[in-house]
């Protein structure tokens, strides 16, 4: 992804103030939360028999992040996905707590065994990927340290993909980000764009581009998210082949909620 000229030629070198980081930390209190509205996309370019092809997946996520002590404890989202060339998938609801996720919609509930209306799964990652809409104080500090103020309350910066993800194994690529703050130095919006290319010819794609536009509102809102009762949940691993096909057709993500 080409870095916009205005980013490359930005003349402001003023370091971002620490206030936004302090403002964010002050919000991370048990029982409190923030409203999230996020639009994201993944665009995959690849070549088959010397013919250029592209697949794009768009995701719309709206809902609430609930905080525990110093970070996100739970989330309750409505998710809608569409892809090109496949088309739209039925929307679904996902509730996440700790490393667990629970997914439902009317079609999924209908396809499950009697008495069950949610599908439960557990991530093996250290942090639940469904909490990715949240910006941690460490993330914010890093991005502000790589940014310049382009106008009041707006910062723009760039980093390598390895720097941004704190992982040298992610391949080559660049990340561009915009941060927007209100008068109280609280985040109102983040826009992140990145493009990665494989390090060798064995990978099945040429480039992969990510775009995420996340808007935050209602900082400090009361947020108490309850997970579904155990008797209403069936573990994803216990779905038989017929039921798995039915819930995927009803909107359950084919690769799971994470």
Image (cartoon, rainbow, N blue to C red):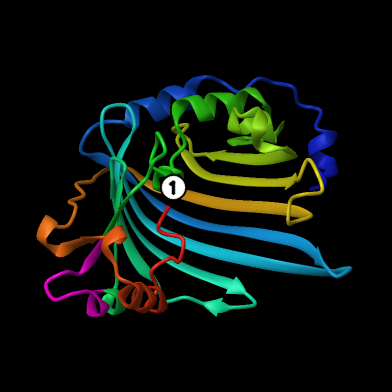
Horizontal and vertical percent position of residue 179: 59, 39
Identify which residue, 213 or 252, lies in the foreground.
252
Q: Secondary structure at mark 1?
A: strand
Q: Alpha-carbon neighbours of circle 1 within 10 Å: few (<14), some, or many (≥20)?
A: many
Image position of 254 with respect to 129: above or below: below
Q: Which residues are magenta?
A: 109-119
**Is 63 within the magenta?**
no
Horizontal and vertical percent position of residue 102: 28, 57
Q: Which residue is mark 1?
A: 216
Q: Is residue 245 visible?
A: yes
Image position of 180 with respect to 95: above or below: above
Horizontal and vertical percent position of residue 187: 48, 38
Farthest front residue in view: 241
Residue 177 is left or right of residue 91, and the answer is right
- Residue at the spot 30% in from the left edge and 79% down from the top edge: 107
**Is 113 within the magenta?**
yes
- Residue at the spot 66% in from the left edge and 28% down from the top edge: 168
Image position of 178 with respect to 15: above or below: below
């Amino acid at each position: 992804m080409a870095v916009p000229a205005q980013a490359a030629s930005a003349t402001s070198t003023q370091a971002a103030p620490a206030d936004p980081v302090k403002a964010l930390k002050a919000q991370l209190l048990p029982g409190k939360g923030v409203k999230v509205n996020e639009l994201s996309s993944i665009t995959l370019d690849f070549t088959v028999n010397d013919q250029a092809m592209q697949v794009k997946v768009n995701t719309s996520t709206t809902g609430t992040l609930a905080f525990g002590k110093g970070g996100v404890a739970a989330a309750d989202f409505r998710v809608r996905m569409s892809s090109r060339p496949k088309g739209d998938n039925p929307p679904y609801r996902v509730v996440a707590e700790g490393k667990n996720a629970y997914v439902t919609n009317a079609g999924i509930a209908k396809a499950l065994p009697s008495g069950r209306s949610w599908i439960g799964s557990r991530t093996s990652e250290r942090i639940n990927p469904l909490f990715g809409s949240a910006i941690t104080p460490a993330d914010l500090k890093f991005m502000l340290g790589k940014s310049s103020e382009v106008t009041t309350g707006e910062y723009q910066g760039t980093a390598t993909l390895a720097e941004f993800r704190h992982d040298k194994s992610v391949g080559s690529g660049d990340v561009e980000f915009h941060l927007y703050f209100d008068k109280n130095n609280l985040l109102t919006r983040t826009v992140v764009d990145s493009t990665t290319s494989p390090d060798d010819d064995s990978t099945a794609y040429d480039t992969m581009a990510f775009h995420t536009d996340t808007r935050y509102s209602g900082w400090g809102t009361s947020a108490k998210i309850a997970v579904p009762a155990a008797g209403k949940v069936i573990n994803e691993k216990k779905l038989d082949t017929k039921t798995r096909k039915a819930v995927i057709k009803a909107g359950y993500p084919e690769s799971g909620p994470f």
